[in-house]
Image (tube, rainbow, N blue to C red):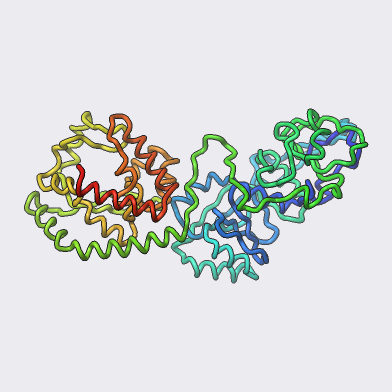
Amino acid sequence: MTVMADMPVKITDPRVEPVRIWGLDASTLHEAHWRSKGVQCVRRGCAAAPARGTELFMLLEPGQLVLFELRAMTDRLAWRSAALTRLRVVDHEEGTYRERVRADARGRVLGVDREYWARTRSSYRILLTRHWRVAREWAAGLDRRTTWKRLRDRVGHSNIDVWHCPGWCAAAGDVTDEARLVEALVETWPRPDVVIDGIVEADPRVWCLAADAERLRDRCLGPAWIGALACDEDPEPSLLIGPAWHGDVASDAVSAASVRIRSIREVEPVDPVPGEPRSAPRSNEAYLRTKRLLDIAMSGFLLLVLAPLILAIALLVLLDDGWPLLFGHVRQTRGGRDFHCWKFRTMHRNAEQIKQQLIADNRCDGPQFYIPDDPRVTRVGRLLRRFHLDELPQLWNVFVGDMSLVGPRPSPDAENQICPAWREIRLSVRPGITGLWQLERTRQAGTDFQEWIHYDVQYVEQASLGMDLRILCRTFWSVLFKE
């Protein structure tokens, strides 16, 4: 911790006294930091119930304080789609020692302290989940072993992911650990005001109480956090150079009315690095469950009603170009899982070899392939494509849960790698037989890929039962009355 010279009050040594900044202890600052990222910390044995609608719950033991790079986990959480992630956070350092300058109250250097440590200090095992009921059960647990066994039985072994990542591990109540945690927060958390109501930015990345802002303006070089200062009659503090923090001097100056931690519903998560890919939107579980029930009911009903038509189409494909009747292209569904997207075969069996000769005629600007009057299409295939009858076998994909009636177009892994941010959003839901892009696309040269991204993202962000019904109605109308 850098010392503030000529401070008119006693300097708090973080290795002797517990951390206290703006009336908040280290555990409160830790939970506020994670709340700014849309994560709610839930401790085992805590009486407070987790807040519904939270994007991600972090399940901790009492006293555990952890920091790690959440963006490194974003893709894994989206792609694995596990009900519970068992994460080991490993606290290690690149070097083997650190030097600190000792100074007196007037800023004069007294000496240099060198601190040695092991390469790996400690590690904590924590749990991550998006499910409120899992978080609630953890909060009600009395001991770790029994609670973990109950959660494992609830979600099943196949729905548990195991991973590890580097980070900071600290113990609440250990003043040295708490000081290290605050040092890390000062350096890595640029906007504590997103969650902590009552603090202001006196200078760039210099945070203090509103009452102390004028006294500190132009006297600190951030990043720095300054706790409650003494009375206004005391002399002005001298220059403080960050990264640094200074605990409360006048703790009685901080009241519950002046500093407040916003609830997680009040917080809009802030991405600290502009330009980073957006994460998948928060899902509405009630909507997803209702949509899945409708998918099962409608696809099962249509498979039964259309069974004679499906058999007739199968016979036509067989007579026109022989076996196989179906073509199952490998696509990706929710969470990045591969599945076979079934269609009646509408192309000749050597279509992939012919494709290489037609690359120059491709009308799409992205990873897709499309040319008018494709010579690879069979005679029956042209009729099936005209009325989209080749997609009837996808009703089976909907029935078993690989697809939905409405959603983004199912695409293979090679196409999803073109745009990682777009991929993450698309794979947060099941792909659909029809969707917004299929209805709105213009097929204008040089715009198809951009339209694909635009309409898929728009659908995922605005999806609702009303929107799904409108898309289904427009699809039936388009198939029956338009080309």
The quadrant of the rendering that contains the N terminus is top right
Residue 452 placement: quadrant: top left
- Observer-nearest residue: 210 or 145? 210
* Number of callouts: 0
In percent of width and height, residue 432 lies at 32, 51
Q: Position of residue 350 (x, y in %)?
A: 15, 42
Q: Residue furthest right?
A: 233
Query: Left of 60 or right of it: where is 396?
Result: left
Q: Nearer the viewer, residue 360 or 169?
A: 360
Tell me which residue sits at (32%, 50%) in the image: 471
Is residue 337 shown to the viewer in this render? no
Whether residue 9 can be seen here: yes
Counting from the top left corner in percent of width and height, residue 311 is at 14, 60
Q: Residue at x 38, y 44 (%)?
A: 456
**Residue 483 picture location, percent across and down:** 20, 42
For this rendering, which residue is in front, 352 or 424?
A: 424
Tell me: 464 left or right of 199: left
Residue 351's place in the image compared with 146, above or below, is above
Viewer-nearest residue: 118 or 441: 441
In the rendered structure, the answer to whether residue 69 lies left or right of residue 183 reads left
Q: Residue at x 57, y 41 (%)?
A: 271
Q: Is residue 94 above or below residue 173?
A: above
**Residue farthest to the left, as pictured:** 319
